[in-house]
Image (cartoon, grey):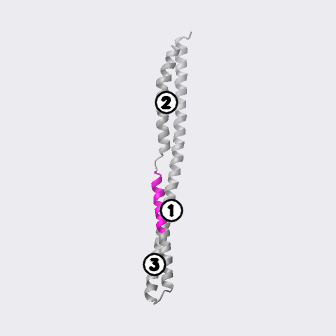
Amino acid sequence: MRGPGEDAQGTATLLSEVVAGIGRLVRGELALAKAEAAENLKAAGTGVIKIIVAAVLALVGLNVLAGAAVAALAATGLGPGWAALLVGLALCVVAVVLLATGRAALRLKGLWPDRAVRGLRRDAAAVRAGLQEEGVNHVRRNA
């Protein structure tokens, strides 16, 4: 049979192990959250870069379209003006596609680390359940 000192020592050891395990779990979840946030920031940065490139291409496209309008008005036939118009329209289409994909990249992932938060909630529920069930059963078995 165990004495009261041995039960207290076993309980203290068990609680120490639980606290150490929770500490390791929290550190792991924080590392996951950090990695997920870095991944989301990288995706947001890519989206911002696409939007900037789209803006630059749109400005170039508008410049070419303006040149095409001037050339079309100056020319009497289907000469260089229409060619410049086609180039300007192609650049604008590329700009619209880049703008749409850049906006989609910004919408796809928020900056909140969802997987890490779900993992922390799941871990907290498991720890609570384990403490309620195992802790009670462990104390009852040793008593």
Residue 70 image-quadrant placement: bottom left
| Residue shown at 46% from the left, 37% from the top | 121
Residue drawn at x 55%, y 22% as measured from the top left: 13
Query: Mark on residue 65?
Result: 3
Q: Quadrant of the N terminus?
A: top right
| Numbered label attached to residue 49 | 1
- Residues in magenta? 95-110
- Residue at the far right in the pictured view: 1
The reply to whether residue 56 is in sight is: no
Q: Nearer the viewer, residue 101 or 21?
A: 101
Which one is in front, 67 or 1?
67
Q: Secondary structure at mark 1?
A: helix
In this rendering, the label closer to the viewer, 1 or 3: 3
Residue type beneath disc 3 = Leu
Which residue sits at x=50%, y=73%? 90
**Is label 3 in a helix, a strand or a loop?**
helix
- Callout 2: SS: helix
Q: Which residue is mark 2?
A: 127
